[in-house]
Amino acid sequence: MKISRDNVLDILKIAFNEDLKGKDHSSIACIDKDKIGHAKLISKENGMIAGLQLAEWIFEYNDSKLKLLKLKKDGDYVKKGDTILEVSGNLLSILRSERIVLNFMQRMSAIATKTSSFVKIINNKKTKLLDTRKTTPGNRIIEKWAVNIGGGVNHRFGLYDMILIKDNHIDFCGGVKNAINKCKNYIDQKKLDIKLVIEARNLSEVKQIINLGGINRIILDNFTIEKTKKALILINKKFEVESSGNINIKNITNYADCGVDYISVGALTHSINNFDLSLISSYKI
């Protein structure tokens, strides 16, 4: 994923408006408007840091005169006590940016750290780790960016960039055959250049999908290891295969060893404890 400042500008506007609405009354009341200060971003635990580029854009958006020194880069492993960046300039500007930088970086670093721990386990295998749409509303681009930094691969970004036939679509259409045919016709009619992916709930549906063809990937939804192996024999490399559902740090290696192309894990973004960071400010009297 290649991210530019323009991609996140709307998110920054919302973040600053939510927190400030133009004023930081506490700081304005206590600190001279011309006071120059300095701050260090310190890691309070071990893990992978993410969001440094975003932090730079946040400080720049708030006050282009702030000077930033990045001592680490996105994707670096840090230890408790490491200084990650330093910022200097108008103290009010630094304080206005503080919580927004921390909120984004703490979540991004937590996601990157968790993603990295999964990627390490399946390292040297062909299987790629995918995220899902289970993200915080409004922050999907930020959270999927963090997955990338951690070594994961982004699944579809939204409902618009892939057709993914799930169990409810199959049931509403009256079966696998109708669902696939309807979606293929829709792609043709709309002249769309998007992938067609379908979930299979059991081996019977896998067989139906193989016989029909015309899809790019089969998702084996909540399959056991044994059933995953059987499905892969049936599919015989005719289509990409993704494993999904109840996959965690303890069993992901078993699924990767089956030989699937992808494993999607919603917990990369939906079950996260923020990474502990602190921005320590100081100034000269």
Image: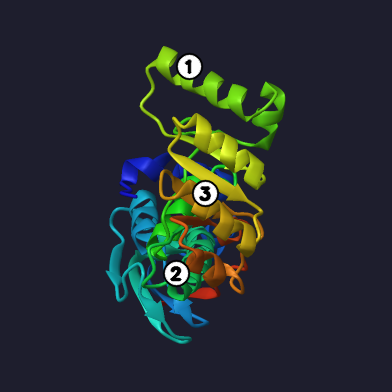
Q: CA distance from mark 2 to mark 1?
A: 37 Å
Up-down relation of residue 21 to residue 181 (above or below): below
Of tags 2 and 1, the one toward the viewer is 1
Question: Label 2's element?
Answer: helix
Q: Quadrant of residue 281?
A: bottom left
Q: Position of residue 13 (x, y in %)?
A: 46, 42
Residue type highlighted by circle 2: Val
Counting other residues with Cα less than 10 Å from the Cα at mark 2, is it few (<14), some (14-19), or many (20 or more)?
many
Residue type highlighted by circle 1: Asn
Counting other residues with Cα less than 10 Å from the Cα at mark 1, is it few (<14), some (14-19), or many (20 or more)?
few
Q: Which residue is mark 2?
A: 119
Q: Which residue is mark 3?
A: 234
Residue drawn at point x = 30 percent, y = 66 percent: 68
Question: Label 1's element?
Answer: helix
Q: Earlier in the sequence, mark 3 or mark 2?
A: 2
Q: CA distance from mark 3 to mark 2?
A: 27 Å
Q: Is residue 41 visible?
A: yes
Counting other residues with Cα less than 10 Å from the Cα at mark 3, is it few (<14), some (14-19), or many (20 or more)?
some
Q: CA distance from mark 1 to mark 3?
A: 26 Å
Residue drawn at point x = 46 percent, y = 62 percent: 259
Of tags 3 and 2, the one toward the viewer is 3
Residue drawn at point x = 48 percent, y = 71 percent: 113
